[in-house]
């Protein structure tokens, strides 16, 4: 064992042990100095944010973005629990009487489409599909308008007579 200690003192192992002991001592001294500085120094003062970063910015949307000024959105917010579908106003316009020989009795509304300013309906008349554009005539009726759920026809004989065809949904397909 004496021989080992002698070899350590004179050799490379002794120098390595000295370096490790010095590194541990340096670490302990720096940790002690850091702890003293943290305990004795005051933290830096907070810098308040600039007033311009706290001001709300007013956003002006172009008139084309919201033609009605967004009044409907403000009046009926999307995520309110009390929000309900809008009730349709009852129409006081006369509706054409249903007769067995009217062409609209044989018409089934399959779909509606809209492209910019124009639109129309896809109908089935006696098993044959046909596209009708708004304003197009079908015997004594003219397609006056469409909504997402129905198509409205007006009589060519009497403009006060109107018929509304509901959209036919495919069941189980």
Image: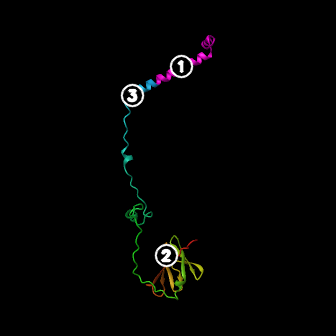
- Find residue 156 and report its horizontal and vertical position in percent: 48, 86
**Disc 3 packing (10 Å; few <14; some 14–19; many ≥20):** few
- Find residue 106 and report its horizontal and vertical position in percent: 54, 83
* Predominant SS along the magenta part: helix
The magenta region covers 1-30
Give the label, 2 or 1, closer to the camera.
1
Q: Earlier in the sequence, mark 2 or mark 1?
A: 1
User: According to the image, label 2 marks what residue?
Assistant: 150
* 168 with respect to 36 (left or right): right
User: According to the image, label 3 marks what residue?
Assistant: 39
User: According to the image, label 1 marks what residue?
Assistant: 21
Relative height, residue 49 to residue 101 (above, below): above
Residue drawn at (57%, 18%), measured in percent from left and top?
A: 17
116 falls in the magenta region: no
Pick the residue in front: 99 or 148. Answer: 99
Q: Secondary structure at mark 2?
A: strand
- Find residue 32 and report its horizontal and vertical position in percent: 44, 24
Q: Earlier in the sequence, mark 1 or mark 3?
A: 1
Q: Secondary structure at mark 3?
A: helix
Q: Which quarter of the figure is the N terminus placed in?
A: top right
Give the label, 1 or 3, closer to the camera.
1
Pick the residue in front: 79 or 59. Answer: 79
**Disc 1 packing (10 Å; few <14; some 14–19; many ≥20):** few
**Disc 2 packing (10 Å; few <14; some 14–19; many ≥20):** some
Calculate the distance from the C-alpha at mark 3 to the C-alpha at mark 2: 78 Å
Report how many numbered discs are placed on residues in the image. 3
């Amino acid at each position: 064992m004496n021989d080992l200690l002698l070899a350590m003192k004179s050799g490379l192992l002794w120098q390595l042990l000295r370096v490790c002991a010095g590194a541990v001592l340096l670490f302990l001294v720096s940790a002690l100095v850091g702890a003293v500085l943290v305990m004795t120094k005051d933290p830096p003062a907070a810098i308040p944010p600039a007033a311009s970063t706290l001001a709300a910015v007013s956003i002006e949307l172009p008139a084309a973005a919201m033609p009605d000024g967004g009044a409907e959105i403000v009046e009926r917010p999307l995520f309110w629990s009390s929000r309900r579908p809008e009730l349709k106003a009852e129409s006081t316009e006369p509706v054409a009487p249903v007769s067995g020989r009217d062409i609209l009795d044989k018409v089934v509304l399959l779909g509606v489409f809209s492209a910019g300013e124009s639109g129309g309906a896809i109908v089935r008349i006696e098993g044959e599909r046909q596209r009708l554009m708004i304003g197009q005539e079908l015997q004594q009726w003219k397609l006056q308008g469409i909504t997402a759920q129905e198509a409205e026809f007006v009589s060519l004989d009497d403009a006060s007579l109107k018929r509304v065809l509901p959209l036919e949904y495919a069941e189980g397909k």
